[in-house]
Amino acid sequence: MNENISREVRAMHDMSGHAAAVHHAPTSFIRKHVFSLDHKVIGKQYYGLALAAVIIGMVLSWLMRIHLAWTNAAIPGLHLMSTSGAPGDVMTPEFYLQLMTMHATIMVFFVLTTAPFAAFGNYFLPIQVGAEDMPFPHFNMMSFWVTFVGFLVLMASFFVSEGPTLGGWTQYAPLSALGSAGGPGEGMGVVLWAASIAIFCVGQLLGSLNFITTTLDMRTRGMSLWRLPLSAWSWFITSCMGLTAFAVLMPACILLILDHVAGTSFFVPSNVVINDQLQPHSGGSTLLWQHLFWFFGHPEVYIAIVPGMGIVSHVLITNMRKPMLSHRVLVYSMGALAVLSYMVYGHHMFLSGMNPVSSLVFSFPTLVITIPSTMVVLIWLGSLYGAKIRINTASLFALGFISMFISGGVSGFFLAQPSIDIMLHATYFVVGHFHMVMGVAAMFGIFAGTYFWFPKMYGRMMNETLGKAHFWLSFVGTYAIFMPFHYLGLAGNVRRYQAFVVEYMQPLIPVHRFITIAALFTGAAQLIFLYNLIYSRFKGEPAKDNPWQATSLEWSTPTTPPPHNNFGDKLPVVYHDPYQYGVQGSAGDYIMQTSPEKVTTPDEA
Amino acid sequence: MARFFAVTIFVIAILSAIPIVRHTWWMAPDISTHGGPIDEQMVDTMWEAGISFLASQILLAWFIWRFSGDRPGEKTKNFPGGAKTVVWAAFLLVGTEVLALGVFGVKAWANVYFTPPAANAMPVQVQAGQFAFYFRYPGPDGTFGALHPEMISESNENFFGLDTANDADAKDDIVTAEMAIPVNREIHLLMHSKDVGHSFFVPELRVQQDFVPGLDLSVHFTATKIGRYEIVCTQLCGLGHYNMKAYLSVMSQQDYDGWLKKQAALQ
């Protein structure tokens, strides 16, 4: 009892002078594992949600790919998903679009925003800054459960009579705003989609609140901003984007719902005729939806990738045994990406009918944003020079991220130019671009983080042989899937088609079959990861506290996994920059941030 | 394993570049008067992107090959010139190249969007609706009749909502499911949507433009090669999106005149 009081008192007047969040270690099962205030549990819950989501999202992509390659084929069992969508197990055109919409929505929101940011960020940001937890643990708990409810609402659209919405994750109006008149799934399906995303936004706003205040206010003594690891910076920068981007998407979704249920016409103009009926709307703006959506949508893709950049940098440094060529340039570059991301959104709208002058205006910041992206890649490459790269699964995925980001990034040179967009807009070139630069790269970042931090989270190592097999199949497989998308796009293969009946696209069908086979193989390879995850959780080789000989605060916790309050009785004191590698430390070629020993390079020893 | 990884990256980079270099899958040949600068931009960008892609992947592969493993006795060292070199490289190499592309690309865009149609451009109207394109020619009076959306009736084949009974301008309008134009004649394509968002894309013509419900838009172009081309919808418009297409026939002036007469008789 006395011990608890003195810890509370101490915490209230802790050495940094800021109030600390203190919550006692829970005792009940519900408090420990379900409604937990502990950021570490919340991080794992987000990870579990993302894992479930990615499995569903990936299965949806397999169904899509099989249908594209063999359009009239019966896929055994498909009628169980939807009798109207797959009579006789053959996918209808609308069902393809519905699966496609759900694939994208699940992946972008519940995987790419959730895993690199909410999962790893929740778990490791407080530890990396040296705090016991985030400052608003109740908001934090709410953020996960709200996100989870959002996921359930989205999944519910599979079970309504017309099925999910078919309008793509971009839900362009007026198709999305007209209700059932627009097509199957456009009534309840859209309402559920918009409600789910609005709920998701609330969850993210609560999370961003915590991330920002943790970074600014909860750093332990000696942890200046510049001593934060790059992963911490990436989560901080991402949470700033999240606050402003999701704050615009949420009202947009609410307006969309109002067009459905309240008779408003925010996004529907007059004179819309469907089935010979004039629709009861007037005064709305089709383009308004696009502006609102993409103002969110472009920062969103950086929200998806910046944490990956931070994680990959963090993992690489440990495995290079030297810091990055410039820590500050990486931070400034990630910050520049975040700021510029708000100025480029119109590049999704070059041909949308907005003023063509606007298209040029948006294309310039889009080209300029290449500069910080390139800087990040060149710093990574330049840092590899002279390194002592350790090859393990985590570092392989981190290096693979660089390769993927380069490949996905250079196709951006084309899409940034309105004149070239005339030929590439709405083709598979765009689909290839964003899958590589955002989808695969972010997944590799998630994998790098998983293999790297699993020992700290669970006290066990993941199996390296299985990990490497997972890496090789994924690296080669994802290139085999997505590189051909660019060729298809150049040849004019339009996207979001459930089948290729257009004459000029017939010669491209064999390419689609190749892609489908690659996709199925690569998908199967992910089972290795799933098996490794589950097996290692229970039977993995026990891990030491600092198996990677790393320097940042998460590796200095008194136990592995960390105790409830992360650091035990005393908050750590930080003496060093985050990446003292290649120096003469008592433990080896590194000095931990919490170590009071002075830094000497081998020369000075 | 590091060396194997380096080789894999190198091989993937080369294999990826081959179909581009060989134009295995490429844009259809240009049949427009404005497409030249667009194609030039594409080729210039392909050079720049291609060189950046190959150089960075090869550098990545080389550094993985050269700098993996503990190499006991060797210290870690920094890239000569340090971060400064890298920052300057990013600004100068990429910044100027990429911005140059943007500046040069303005001309290709301006050709399409900042030049008004010629005074004698031939007007053709296209209406996009779930899931078909319909076209309208103004007929001998050269004037399009007014549109009455409330009169649209698919079953009566009154696709545009024309009041042919009372509107003299509408009486001689020619409505078709196929678009035909004379070769080497500038066309002023007037676009509107009956319902949701659609898009008009003819790759050979180097034209793609979204329809925006509530907005009347237009593009103009001149086709230089006789032939039959496909117009496809590229803006997701519902379940029939994949099948929403029409044919564009570019004909000699004589053949076009004959075609138009035939269509007029079918009204």
Image (tube, coloured by chain):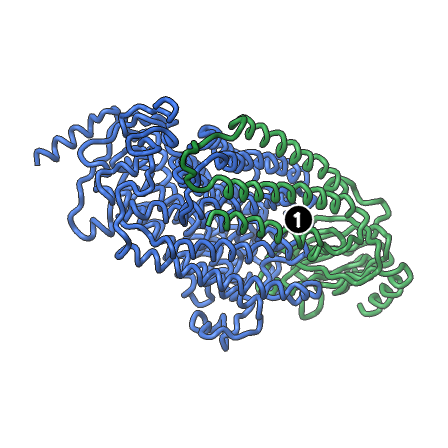
Chain colours: A blue, B green
For the N terminus of chain A, the quadrant is: top left
Foreground pick, A439 / A502? A439
Work out which quarter of the rendered image holds the C terminus of chain A and state it. top left
Q: Quadrant of residue A593?
A: top left
Q: Residues within 10 Å of mark 1 (few under 14, many from 20)?
A: some
**Residue drawn at point x = 69 percent, y = 34 percent:** B100
- For residue B19, what is the image quadrant? bottom right
Is residue B128 shown left or right of residue A407? right
Q: Residue A140, image x and y in percent?
A: 30, 42
* Extreme residue in the right direction: B254
Q: Residue A424 location, x and y as percent? A: 65, 50
Q: Type of residue at label 1?
A: Leu
The residue depicted at 80 percent of the width and 51 percent of the height is B32
- Residue A307 picture location, percent across and down: 43, 41
* Residue indicated by mark 1: B215
The residue at the point 77 percent across, 42 percent down is: B111
Q: Position of residue A586 (x, y in %)?
A: 28, 30
Residue nearer the viewer, A28 or A231: A231
User: Is there any visible trace of residue A534 in the rendered image?
Assistant: yes
- Element type at marker 1? loop
Residue A308 lies, with reference to residue A160, above or below; the image says above
Could you say which is closer to the camera, residue B156 or residue A57? A57
Chain at tag 1: B
Residue A131 vs A190, above or below: the answer is above
Q: In the current view of this chain or complex, which residue is farthest to the left?
A: A2
Q: Residue furthest front?
A: B73
